Amino acid sequence: MQAFIRSASARDIEAVSRLLGQCWHETHDSIHGADRVAALTSEWHSPSALKASLDRPGSEFLVADTGKTLVGMAYAQQDGKSVMLKQLYILRQAQGAGLGTAFLQEIIECFPEAEKIVLEVDEANESAIGFYMAGGFAITGKTGGKAGSGIPALIMEFPIV
């Protein structure tokens, strides 16, 4: 599937919200249950939450666009010399085409002063953990998860050289 990565705009917010809902259901329904996933995505990936991210200084909000539809997104914020990768999601049918790696490369280019990328990933999301580890990320810690969600997460880091 051919897609290009570009900066997101306000006109993308509704489509990104739907994309995130679909990605979360594809990945997490079997782990956390469809009802819990629906509740989390309605809170975390609502258009208003995404709009706030779009306008946040020191951040980059990217989408993968086929020209007809969005198939992926990534969002990162700079925190000193670290880049916090808050989101990187690709629809299942678009995975394996290099978009994840392209998003990471674009994030690195957007933050030239950064020394590392840091992220949290659901410790039950084996495919995401495998992707990050194959790309050079290392597990550096563990957390209880985002906003008191109770979803255990691994902290992973990638040094930017």
Image: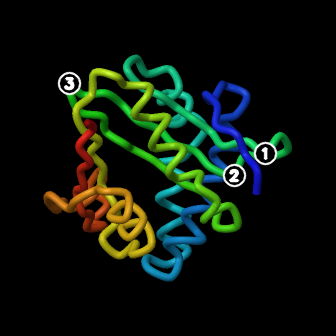
Say which amino acid is labelled 3: Gly
Tell me the residue that label 3 is attached to: 80
Q: CB atoms at circles 1 and 2 under 8 Å apart?
A: yes
Q: Secondary structure at mark 1?
A: loop
Q: Earlier in the sequence, mark 3 or mark 2?
A: 2
Neighbours of disc 1 within 10 Å: few (<14), some (14-19), many (20+): some
Which corner quadrant of the image does residue 108 belong to? top left
Q: Position of residue 19 (x, y in %)?
A: 66, 53
Say which amino acid is labelled 2: Val
Please state the total of marks drawn on the protein image: 3
Check the picture and name the quadrant holding the C terminus: top left
Q: Position of residue 99 (x, y in %)?
A: 59, 51
Judge whether 30 appears above or below 134 on screen: below
Q: Position of residue 37 (x, y in %)?
A: 50, 67
Dot label at residue 112: none
Say which amino acid is labelled 1: Thr
Q: In the image as oriented, which residue stretches furthest toward the right? A: 68
Label 3 to label 1: alpha-carbon separation? 33 Å
Please report the residue visible at 76 percent of the width from the left and 50 percent of the height from the top: 2
Dot label at residue 71: 2
Tell me the residue that label 1 is attached to: 66
Please report the residue visible at 69 percent of the width from the left and 52 percent of the height from the top: 71
Which corner quadrant of the image does residue 137 belong to? bottom left
Which corner quadrant of the image does residue 94 belong to? bottom right
Q: Position of residue 20 (x, y in %)?
A: 59, 53
In the image, taking residue 141 as reference, residue 49 lies left or right, namely: right
Label 3 to label 2: alpha-carbon separation? 30 Å
Q: Secondary structure at mark 2?
A: strand
